[in-house]
Amino acid sequence: MGFASLNPSYGDAMRRIYAVGDIHGSLGKLQNLVARCEEDTGGRPMTFVFLGDYIDRGPQSRGVVEYLIELQSRMSGHMIPLMGNHEALALAAIDSSLDEGGWLLEGGDMTLASYHAGSAHELPGKHVAWLRSLRLTYDDGRRLFVHAGVNPEKPLDAQDDPDLLWIREPFLSDARDYGRLIVHGHTPTPTGRPDLRANRLNIDTGAVYGRALTAAVFDGEQTGPVAFIQASE
């Protein structure tokens, strides 16, 4: 896996992109947020970009994965799910490259409970295949969508997978212009509100900790978000 750049042929000015932050098994919030985003389009074409961390910590990881698989099928290429570090941990446990205990300590125990499974090896093959299909980045020409962020010391086309999935510092404190607005999650904002800077936007607003699940709304007219939509339940 590595950096992937894509300039969509459907990127007309009318299309709205809805980027959704970390879900962590919060199925009800996800369903409500998607419904609000669909209502917001007002008939315009839309694309969803999900920033990863669909599983672990929250109670309904299986339901979230099932919902996203169905949504992706229904949206015919206009739903783009990215990988988060929690999906990577689950896959490492399945592939035995990580002691399963390490994943369980990061919330994997809640994922197994949602599947009524005793170990990562018991997760449904269809769901595991979907997790393996997740990409690390999505570049729409103005914004780079990624789970955790980027290494400020490396060009965007030379990023390492662990940084895309795990980085916090020095990325969070760096103010340089990347040539893209970096849209990310991974680090919950303490306020429950999105954190917009000149060079990046953090939309992990801590849904699994009782705060809202957030979508940032983008259009073809400007690089920054035109709105935010949240679901608190």
Image: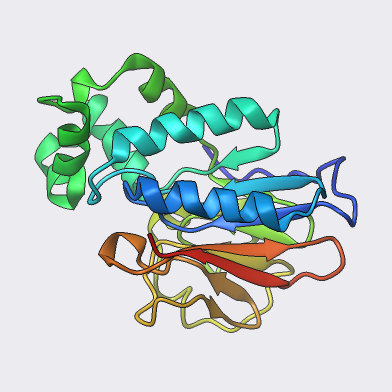
Any part of residue 160 in sight: no
Asked which quadrant contains residue 186, the reply is bottom left
Going 28% across and 36% down the picture, which residue do you hit?
90
Q: Is residue 97 above or below residue 54?
A: above
* Horizontal and vertical percent position of residue 96: 20, 27
Going 14% across and 35% down the picture, which residue do you hit?
100
**Residue 195 appears left or right of 90:** right
Asked which quadrant contains residue 41, the reply is bottom right
**Number of numbered markers:** 0
Is 25 or 124 nearer to us in this picture? Answer: 25
Going 35% across and 40% down the picture, which residue do you hit?
88
Q: In this view, does 183 lie above or below 29?
A: below
**Residue 54 appears left or right of 101:** right
Going 63% across and 39% down the picture, which residue do you hit?
79
Q: Is residue 226 above or below residue 117?
A: below
Is 140 or 171 nearer to us in this picture? Answer: 140
* Horizontal and vertical percent position of residue 119: 13, 26
* Horizontal and vertical percent position of residue 124: 30, 18
Q: In this view, does 131 lie above or below 193?
A: above
* Horizontal and vertical percent position of residue 84: 41, 48
